[in-house]
Image: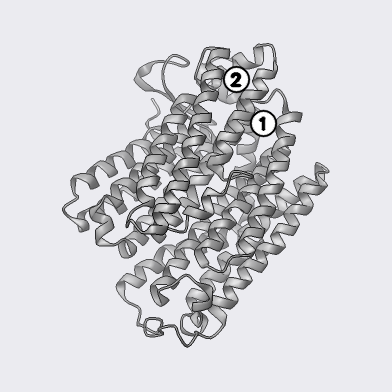
Amino acid sequence: MSPEVALPIIIPLMTGTLTLLAWRSNILQKILSVVGSIALLISSIWLLTSVKEQGHVVLYMGNWVAPYGITLVADMLSAIMVFLTGMTAVAIAVYSLASASASHERFGYYPLMHLLLAGVAGSFLTGDIFNLYVWFEVMLIASFALLILGGERAQMEGAVKYVTMNLLSSAIFLSAIGLLYGLVGTLNMADIAVKLSEAEHTGLVDVIAVMFMVAFGIKAAAFPLFFWLPASYHTGPVAVSALFAGLLTKVGVYALFRVFSLIFNQSIEFTHQLLIWIAVFTMVTGVLGAAAQFEFRRILSIHIISQIGYILLGLALFTPLALAGGVFFIIHIIIVKTNLFLISGITHRLLGTYELKKLGGIYKSRPFLSILFLVSALSLAGLPPLSGFFAKFILIRAGIEAEAWVATGAALFVGMLTLYSMIKIWSEVFWKSLPDETDSSAINQQMTPSLAILYLPVIILTVLTLLIGLMAQPIYMISEFAAEQLLNPSGYIEAVLGVKP
């Protein structure tokens, strides 16, 4: 028995249930949410430790061994993703103490948040391709409900685009599962990998692979089906935007890493060449879109797209160094992107707007907040010695070694434009003087308990960004371990099925 692989799913489900039962008391909901998030983080640390010691941790639900029952399985990539989910959950839960409105709390903010976390953790830990679809739908339901909290016009417009594209993704995903099941007669991912490797390779396998690529590409906001993201992510409450930015698109990325290393590894020349061009266009279009924006959260939202391109580049190159760089980049970007959204929420609390032209004067009145932003912004741009520098350096070196000159050049170009976007935010929000038409009364307010609560997760995430940069070697070793497992899926298959492939 390996309960540590089930706890990251059980804990948020239980927390969501308890907060739902406590819907009459906002204070009790807040306490339960923070405690549940901390418990999720602790359980994720237990899982990460077990995976580091054992390589793989497997749990057969109901003692029905694979491939007949539902299997939960964690390798290093899964464990890393669950750990990052736990960290993000704690940061958002604490931030929500001071940012979530009473009306949102009454309409199920905390139950929905933890239902979403359960869906994210379930997606990372399931060993069954159909259950991956189920957890995706759990996330879709919870995220849609969170996105429309407040019922503002912009939220509803963004939510419609969001749910439409994700329903299309789900339909393609389910169709691909049906075709794959008809081909191999099993839904367990390890068993699919074995039977697909033994079956005669046909064009149908490539068709199914592309269907999965499209379905997960929509979830990950990859080119060319990313337009739902900039229309929706910036419209909800800021804590919701931060949660989405940190985790949701990374579930789609994780699914791509999983299926195109474990299942569809017969036509690497075809699938991964396609992924390289998807990665390049995702990077370039995302950063160009962000450079043209002048709204704080919208810039950050569109930048998610370009950062997804970097991660996909690691998968597309499919070398040990590239995959390690992709995993390293995931660790870096979840922390940094979540933090930048939280910082945008603090500036909104101070000045009441996200429009750059109406913002300013933060550095003069709040120098500490300005430094917190600068650390995360420069890390996003890839400046040394911050986490983003090492993440991009590994990927660019992998691109050079693979002689992928176009992709490597695009990655360098996107890095420079990312720096431009971050400097634009710094200049407009923090450095320039506050415009005369903007109310300056709130910006000079004393540090209140609620404002201090907003600062707390931002400080912690900023410190983590610095530590990843200053102590990059241990993070790289963990990423390298995950990359080795992805390149050699026989360990995953043997752990799940109990036989060597």
Say which element carries label 1: helix
Cα–Cα gap, marks 1 and 2: 13 Å
Residue type beneath disc 1 = Leu
Residue matched to label 2: 193
Rendered image: mark on residue 153: none
N-terminal of the two: label 1 or label 2?
2
* Residue 48 placement (x, y as % from top left): 48, 40
Residue matched to label 1: 487
Query: Residue at (75%, 35%) from the top-left corner?
Result: 273
- Can residue 54 be seen here? The reply is yes
- Quarter where residue 443 is shown: bottom left
- Can residue 321 be seen here? The reply is no
Which tag is nearer the camera, tag 1 or tag 2? 2
* Residue 351 placement (x, y as % from top left): 42, 77
* Residue 51 placement (x, y as % from top left): 51, 35
Q: How many marks?
A: 2
Residue type beneath disc 2 = Ala
Query: Residue at (73%, 29%) from the top-left corner?
Result: 268
- Could you tell me which quadrant the N terminus lies in? top left
107 relative to 368 in the view: left or right: left
454 relative to 205 in the view: left or right: left
Query: Along the line of sight, which residue is nearer the eye, 84 or 217?
Result: 217
Query: Along the line of sight, which residue is nearer the eye, 97 or 53?
Result: 97
User: Around disc 2, counting alpha carbons within 10 Å, would you say few (fewer than 14), some (14 to 19), or many (20 or more)?
Assistant: many
Say which element carries label 2: helix
323 relative to 431 in the view: left or right: right
Query: Residue at (49%, 19%) from the top-left corner?
Result: 187
- Quarter where residue 64 is shown: top left
Query: Residue at (55%, 38%) from the top-left corner?
Result: 254
- Could you tell me which quadrant the C terminus lies in? top right
Residue reaching furthest to the bottom:
436
In this rendering, is residue 349 above or below 159? below
